[in-house]
Image: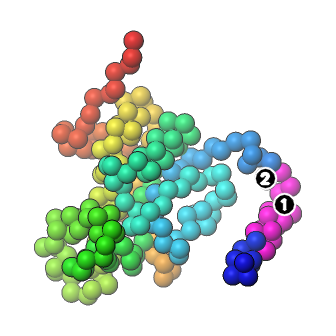
Amino acid sequence: MTDIAPLFESNRAWAMSKLRGDPGFFDRLTHQQNPAYLWIGCADSRVPANEIVGLDPGELFVHRNVANLVHPADMNCLAVLQYAIEFLQVKHVIVTGHYGCGGVRAAMQPQQLGLIDHWLRPIRDVYDKNQDDLATIVDEYKRLNALCEMNVREQVLNLAKTTIVQNAWHRGQDLSLHGWVYGISNGLIRDLGVTISNPQALAEIFRTESKPERG
């Protein structure tokens, strides 16, 4: 227990500091959760979602996994997405990658890594699709970061292709998808300019009809 005891001490100090600054803080949290944003980010311990954007608990709904992927068969991610959009009524879903991502770096290597290979397969597909452009980048770290950006753009498209997002748009719900990348070296976020706010931005094959109402 000695290794984790400092976590409890830090927790108590944090809770007390919150109460000193705002005595009603935790009482409000127990009564409502009303975030405007869903953050889909990497599980990397250096990328704390709330802290990066300066938001308190309750203001940012968060889903994290290795390399910030949106798998069409990932029930965890899809459940979070549906809850955030249909119940919390978030207005923005933000895929946030980060430069120097270990998951993206692993996907660039030919070695077998085990179970993680299956998870990282979509990034290898992105790499394969863009290998001519990536091959022109001589510096290995810059090539890695270029793939980090490409991966974020791909995941934003994957979000837009889900029926969860498309049904929200069909309902007229105000919902925008964004792609960002975070620089661990300077603490700054970069908007990659891939915001999607309606299904017209997608190829026709990926636009789905709204789900019919049950009689």
Q: Is residue 142 magenta?
A: no
* Residue at the (60%, 62%) spot, across then down: 50
SS at mark 2?
A: helix
Name the image quarter holding the C terminus: top left
Does 28 sit left or right of 91 as displayed? right
Q: As drawn, which residue projects farthest toward the bottom?
A: 139
Can the viewer see residue 153 in this picture?
yes
The amino acid type of the residue labelled 1 equals Leu
The image quadrant that residue 178 belongs to is bottom left
Crowd tier of the residue under label 2, counting other residues whose Cα lies within 10 Å: few below 14, some 14–19, many 20 or above: few
Residue 120: x and y in percent read 30, 66
Report whether 98 appears left or right of 5.
left
Viewer-proximal residue, 41 or 6? 6
Q: Nearer the viewer, residue 70 or 58?
A: 70
- Looking at the image, which residue is at 32% across and 49% down? 72
Q: Nearer the viewer, residue 129 or 136?
A: 129
* Most common secondary structure along the magenta stretch: helix
Q: Residue at x 29, y 64 (%)?
A: 118
Query: Which x, y percent locates residue 115?
Result: 33, 68
Residue under pointer 1: 19
Determine contact: label 2, label 1, CB under 8 Å. Answer: yes
Q: Is residue 174 above or below residue 17?
A: above
Q: Which residues are magenta?
A: 9-25
Give, as a three-letter code, the residue at label 2. Phe
- In which quadrant of the rendered image does the N terminus lie? bottom right
**Where in the figure is residue 58, as x and y percent of width and height?**
65, 51
Label at residue 190: none
Query: Is residue 21 covered in magenta?
Result: yes
Residue at the spot x=37%, y=51% of the render? 74
Q: Regarding mark 1 in the picture, which secondary structure is present there?
A: helix
Looking at marks 2 and 1 on the same chain, the residue that comes earlier in the sequence is marked by 1
Kindly identify which residue carries mark 2. Answer: 26
